[in-house]
Image (cartoon, rainbow, N blue to C red):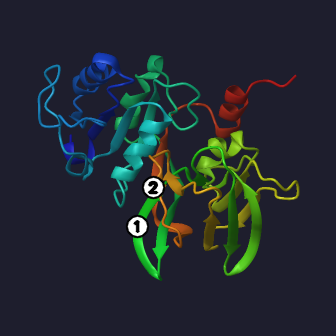
Amino acid sequence: MDNAKNRVVLCPNPYRDKELKYTLETKAMLEKEGVEVKVCMLYSDEIDEPHFGIEFDDLQQAASGASLVVTLGGDGTILHTARKLLGCHVPMVGINLGRVGFLAELSPNELTRLIAASQGKFNTSPRMMLKVEIIRKNEIIFEDYCLNDIVFRGTGQAAIGISVSGNGRRIYDFQGDGIIAATPTGSTAYSLSAGGPIVEPTAENIILTPLCAHVLAVKPFVLTAGSVIEIAGQCVDGKTRGISVDGSELIVLGDDDHVRIRKSGYQTFLAHVGYKGFYDIVYEKLGDSR
């Protein structure tokens, strides 16, 4: 067996996988099958210290040459891992220890599916990502990448004035709570809760979903992946405004800053190892309306 091609990296969220119960179970199961297993702790500053008898590895190094990355947590764990694996083409599959879970495909009672997956028996689902930049006086002062969405919003309960353009042409001018720029993968996350459309996750589009717009005519837009989005906003009553990238803490913008969003050159690759397709998952998660 070629270990470089049969290495699996486990990325547990210790706040979801209490005492690393499922991580230890998965590690033992795969090692019994002759698979090399590396464990990379997420959300922890103690990565170099043994925990439950496990030596933790650096994620970028462990993922290099691996056949699969397995996250143990929820959708947020996948989003966090995806941003740490930028430029690494190793597929990811999630064990859902969270709640709704559109991205984390497997439940804890389906761990044995990882045996076949560790041997390359899965379908790869490439997912578009977005790049976001903060522009100040014509200079880029910040950039980041997301798999789900970028949220432009104010702080507190005051509305903000928002101007949005695509490829230099005006799309919106409105007052409201903010706006979401989402990928198709992120269309079933915050955007959906705010009234945005469901888009097949392997499509390539940018979805704009206003948050509590004070104008009834302001509706969601689905744009081509080649669109370049510019967002600017003015605060009311001295409130600040900022962006959140894939659920991160708010990054506060300066008075004259604006945000540029476009398709990223990076992709995330998810490994589809279950028997359910996207339509099945949507139907199951959102419930039977009959």
* Label 1 vs 2, first from the N-terminus: 1
| Numbered disc 2: secondary structure | strand
| Numbered disc 1: secondary structure | strand
Q: Please indicate, yes or no, whether residue 247 appears anywhere in the rendered image.
A: yes
Residue type, numbered disc 2: Ile
Residue 11 in the figure: left or right of residue 116: left
Q: Position of residue 139 (x, y in %)?
A: 43, 80
Q: Quadrant of the N terminus?
A: top left
Q: Position of residue 113 (x, y in %)?
A: 44, 27
Q: Position of residue 237 (x, y in %)?
A: 63, 55
Residue most extreme to the front: 237
Please give the residue where the numbered disc 2 appears in the rendered image. 251
Which residue is located at x 58 percent, y 57 percent? 238
**Depth check: 120 or 128 in front?**
128
Q: Please indicate, yes or no, whether residue 121 appears anywhere in the rendered image.
A: no
Residue 131 in the figure: left or right of residue 118: right
Dot label at residue 142:
1
Residue 139 in the figure: left or right of residue 23: right
Which residue is located at x 75 percent, y 58 percent? 175
Residue type, numbered disc 1: Phe
